[in-house]
Amino acid sequence: MSVFAVTGASGQIAGKLIPLLARQEGCEKIIGIDIKPPQEKFEKFEFLKKDVRSPELKEVFQANKVQVVFHLAFVLNPIHNLNLMYEINLKGTKNVLKCAREAEAEQVIVTSSATAYGAHPDNPVPLKEEHPLRAEPGFDYAYHKREMDLLCQEFAQNHPELKITIFRPCIVVGKRFENYIARVLLHPFNFFIAGADPYLQFIAEEDVARGLMLSALKRKEGIFNLAGEGWLKLSEIWEIKKRLITLNFPEWFIYPAVRLGWRIHFPMAEFPAGAIDYFRYPWVVDISKAEKELGFVPEYSSRKVWEDYIRWREENPLGFWQTRRKKRIEKRTYQQARQEIFTPD
């Protein structure tokens, strides 16, 4: 029988992963770790209010005889508090790895990101796991994913007794799951950056969860890209939901404009200027390694994921604003909870 631990247990990916794990015959218990509990109730699930930076995780893993740790806690949407973002993303990951090793867990499964490769004009299409990670500091989310990924790789080399599995999913969207990239692609106008028409990929949250579960069941270590089959050009994405206006932003305008908007906290500027490259250059990934070694076959293609998301948004016109309001409330609650339970040195 296996005992699993999931950090970031209140997140959307965890909400899909935990039921999958609970349905496995060999699953004895799932320990959820977060600073606020998930809204749903799960079988075989026990929630513990802990910060991923807390050294108490070692005792949690030991007391529950945790064998596999899924580390999903990460600041998804960019925030202006870069120190806090660094603390959670990098120091949190380092602490989870350290505590898992000291508690003699068997495996740690980490969600990195395809953004860690960076968006560059010379990127091959598609990128494979052996290609270098070149995300740059101008986009903190991607750069932190790169640094976290490299940290995990180094940890795996130094501590071969602990299996480390790293997943690099592309853009994840779902009916009630969105991120800043998806929101930008839903602006009321088509846009291009300096005439560029890059390829993009999407993956359903259910497929991400299934890939994570497969690696745990097979105790498979290594690095794996995750994406829906195929990819779409930006122009094809616009065709799926047609708009009346198409804008082509010149390079000399868009970077300074987004940089200024981010600096003054303009509501529509949801990310720093470095993220513009991800709408200009390719960063799609090859998933053949996950297919071959894990038996991972995505249920939904990139096109299907985006079409379903657009359809859901059209059928739920108030869903966007309800989601945004919910996120603002969750953000305040999250910050309050974090301040209550843990203050870094």
Image (cartoon, rainbow, N blue to C red):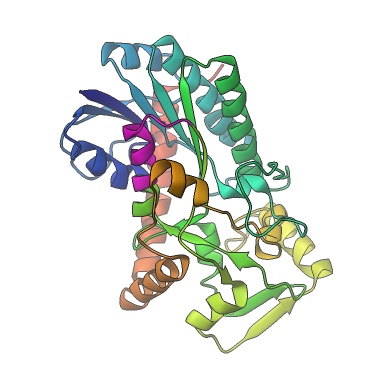
Residue at 32%, 21% (x, y): give it.
67
Name the residue at the bottom extreme.
244
Q: Nearer the viewer, residue 180 or 80?
A: 180
Q: Nearer the viewer, residue 134 or 36?
A: 134
Secondary structure mostly taken by the magenta-highlighted segment of the chain: helix
Quadrant in which residue 68 is drawn: top left
Up-down relation of residue 263 to residue 200 (above or below)? above
Q: Nearer the viewer, residue 250 or 110?
A: 110
Provide residue 131's location: percent of width, then percent of height.
68, 44
Quadrant in which residue 70 is drawn: top left
Name the residue at the front extreme.
292
Residue at 44%, 58% (x, y): give it.
203
Up-down relation of residue 142 to residue 199 (above or below)? above
In the shown orientation, is residue 43 left or right of residue 126? left
Residue at 42%, 52% (x, y): give it.
328
Provide residue 266's location: percent of width, then percent of height.
62, 60
Name the residue at the right extreme.
252
Span shown in magenta: 210-221
Quadrant of the rendering where the N terminus is positioned: top left
Q: Is there any visible trace of residue 143 in the rendered image?
A: yes
Up-down relation of residue 67 to residue 280 (above or below)? above
Residue at 39%, 54% (x, y): give it.
297
Quadrant of the rendering where the C terminus is positioned: top right
Provide residue 61's location: percent of width, then percent of height.
33, 16
